[in-house]
Amino acid sequence: MHPSRGATGNDWQKIVSLSEFKSIIDRLQQDQISKTMREKQTVSFSCKIIGSCWGNQVNWYQKREGEHFTWILYFDFDDNSISRDSTHSQRADFTVGRESDTSELKIQSVKVSHSATYYCACWVSGIHSEN
């Protein structure tokens, strides 16, 4: 509720904007462009593999305004394992799972500090030759 429309005291809650992204690589497809959540709500971001990714791994990154990309974790589709950045200050806030060929990053209880753009990416193998 907007303050000018009668919200008072405890009725007004901070709103957290969590933006989603276009895929870094065309082999991935992400769902809606942006989500606005209230604090303590659950939010999830999905990333579908529509091509092939080297190692069948999807990486998740966080990009706060004015800061560099920060790696959060990767999910391995072959063995359902997760590898996290042990130095990320919010590492315990993120979980990841899968549904068929889709990786889902989830924040169980949104905080204002989660306001960022979230990207998924994967490695693509290529051929390198030197002449």
Image (tube, grey):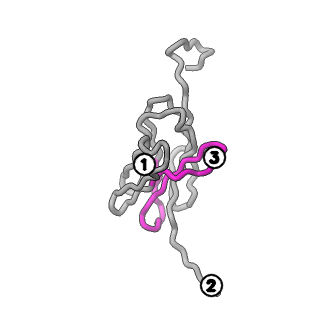
**Which amino acid type is marked by label 1?**
Glu
Q: Are marks 1 and 2 in contact (CB under 8 Å)?
A: no
Residue on which disc 2 sits? 130
Disc number placed over residue 104 in the picture, else none: 1
**Which amino acid type is marked by label 3?**
Glu
Q: Nearer the viewer, residue 112 or 29?
A: 112
Question: Which quadrant would the N terminus be assigned to in this image?
Answer: top right
**Residue at 52 percent of width and 57 percent of height:** 121
Q: Which residues are magenta?
A: 46-73
Give the Cα separation between the discs numbered 3 and 2. 36 Å
Q: Is residue 100 left or right of residue 39?
A: left
Residue on which disc 3 sits? 67
Q: Position of residue 115 (x, y in %)?
A: 56, 38
The numbered mark, 3 or 2, whose residue comes first in the sequence reads 3
Give the Cα separation between the discs numbered 1 and 2. 39 Å
The numbered mark, 1 or 3, whose residue comes first in the sequence reads 3
Q: Position of residue 66 (x, y in %)?
A: 66, 44
Q: Look at the image and say whether residue 1 sits in the magenta stretch.
A: no
Give the Cα separation between the discs numbered 1 and 3. 24 Å
Secondary structure at numbered mark 2: loop
**Which amino acid type is marked by label 2?**
Glu
- Whether residue 106 is visible, yes or no, is no
Residue farthest along the front direction in this orientation = 87
**Residue at 54 percent of width and 74 percent of height:** 126
- Whether residue 111 is visible, yes or no, is yes
* Rendered position, 65 above or below 120: above
Secondary structure at numbered mark 3: loop
> Pointer 3: residues within 10 angstroms few (<14), some, or many (20+)?
few
